[in-house]
Amino acid sequence: MQQQDVNRGGLSPLAEWIGYAGLLPFLGAMLGVGLAPGIDQRDLAQRLGIGYGATILSFVGAVHWGLAVAGRWRWSAGVAFGSIAPSVVATLAVLLGGQRGLGLLVVGFGLFWVYEHRRLGASLPPDYVALRRTLSLAVCALLALTMILSERAGLR
């Protein structure tokens, strides 16, 4: 297996593909909440959306942690907070559960993207920032739709 030239610039097509494929569980959760025949299946789909969303929100914070640990960024209170805050928000979303948990995840993903774009955009590759923008928008939309469908499906 050949290694990709890291000096080439741009994101690996595989990384982009994996990023977009990562939207599938969010889509599955939304469809499950909206289309599953029984309340137990709809509830499971909602919990999938919350659990997967919490995992991915923690993951985006971990990227920042990794950049700091690897010495690409200097440690500061802002870097530490930006690395840890997504996991705290994700944990609170899991504890809240239901529509509130989904709503908190929407806010968490949205605010983290704004933070990443406005405060750190110059220190991140432009292709990464663009991919994160697209994925964050899609995640927020899918989680918001899951939250809306949860109400219609009789889930709290």
Image (cartoon, helix red, strand yellow):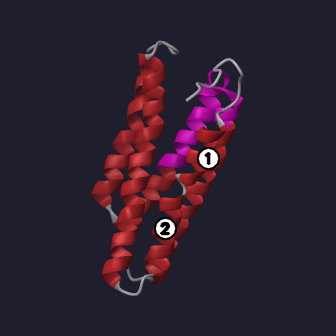
Residue lying at the far left in this picture: please name it: 95
Instruction: Say which of marks 2 and 1 sits in front.
Output: 1
Residue 93, image x, y percentages:
36, 54
Determine the secondary structure under disc 2: helix
Residue 150, image x, y percentages:
44, 75
Q: Is residue 78 visible in the rendered structure shown here? A: no
Left or right: 65 as drawn, with respect to 19: left
**In the rendered picture of this protein, how many numbered marks are placed on residues?**
2
Left or right: 31 as drawn, with respect to 77: right
Q: Residues within 10 Å of mark 2 (few under 14, many from 20)?
A: some
Taking the magenta stretch, the answer to whether it contains residue 119 is yes
Picture quarter containing residue 89? Answer: top left
Residue at 50% over, 51% down: 107
Q: Earlier in the sequence, mark 2 or mark 1?
A: 1
Which label number is shown at residue 28? Answer: 2
Residue at 28% over, 56% down: 95
Q: Which residues are magenta?
A: 108-129
Tell me the CA gap for discs 2 and 1. 18 Å
Residue 54, image x, y percentages:
39, 50
Identify the main secondary structure in magenta.
helix
Residue at 59% over, 61% down: 141
Task: Give the amino acid at mark 2.
Answer: Gly
Task: Give the amino acid at mark 1.
Answer: Trp
Residue that label 1 marks: 17
Picture quarter containing residue 3? Answer: top right
Taking the magenta stretch, the answer to whether it contains residue 104 is no
